[in-house]
Amino acid sequence: MFNVLWNILLGIVGGIISSVIVSRVFFIQGEYQQQTKFVDGIIRKLAMIRAYLSVCKSVFEVSYDEDIRIEKEMKDKGYRCEMEYYAAHKNKNWISVKDLLDKFKSTLLKVVETAQDEIVNSNVTDKYLAEILCDISNYLHDISSTKELNFSTLNRFEKSERLIFEKYDKSKRISGKQLLKLVVKDKVMIVLYILLCLIIAATVFSFALGI
């Protein structure tokens, strides 16, 4: 009678612990997926920022080419200064590069500010994802604290951005390993592993003694 009750008790406890382990694994997986989705959202904002910076760089390049063209035309036609050149071409719709860049920068900084606020209020605990967010935060701070955009600053932003995206791509490749590490190192899971091992040991011990 005791043998039957003992085996039933071990079976019930073992079943409960096994179900708790499965539930815990799904919980850890869900938490990790939420964190990866959050980082995905921040990365999408970075893609928007990259687009704005690419436009700014294009404006600089077009402006540089236009300056060279105007300088050549001034020499060829004998204009003594830029004011004289512009006066001779007053029918053209001249666009101020500074005003155009200020408009792009204003929109850019709104996206940067939104991303910064989201990172500050985030709760990402995975070490590798947290490192990515730290790099992004530094990158966003660099953009927001830059007073003037030029080729030098844009190239610096591109380099930082490229490193972030490389790290992000790596996080996608190793996501399975990262999830496994979280499951193995989880404190609750460790306790459950120990309890399950004790149940198995008790079962083996009871069979050995013929209980």
Image (tube, helix red, strand yellow):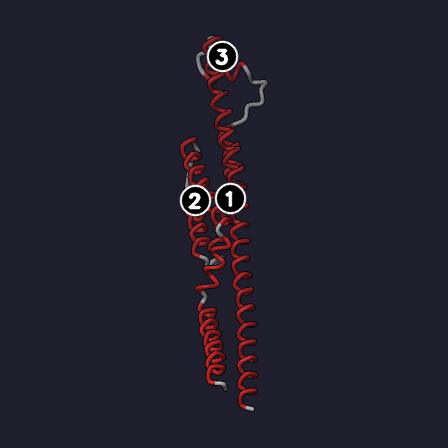
Question: Which amino acid, mark 1?
Answer: Leu
Q: Amino acid at mark 2?
A: Tyr
Secondary structure at badge 1 equals: helix
Write down the residue under mark 3: 73
Which comes before the other along the chain, label 3 or label 1?
Answer: 1
Say which residue appears at 51% left-offset and 17% top-offset.
Answer: 86
Residue 194, position as x, y percentages in the image? 44, 73
To which quarter of the image does residue 142 belong? Answer: top left
Distance from the alpha carbon under mark 3 to that under mark 2? 41 Å
Q: Image point 51% across, 44% down: which residue?
A: 46
Mark 1 and 2 residues: CB-CB less than 8 Å, in contact?
Answer: yes
Tell me how far mark 1 sits from mark 2, CA to CA: 10 Å
User: Circle 1 is placed at which residue position?
Assistant: 46
Residue 138 % position (x, y): 41, 47
Residue 139 marker: 2
Q: Residues within 10 Å of mark 1 (few under 14, many from 20)?
A: many
Vertical position of residue 38 compared to residue 153: above or below = below
N-term-proximal mark, 3 vs 2: 3
- x, y (%) of residue 57? 49, 31
Pick whichever of labels 1 and 2 is earlier in the sequence: 1
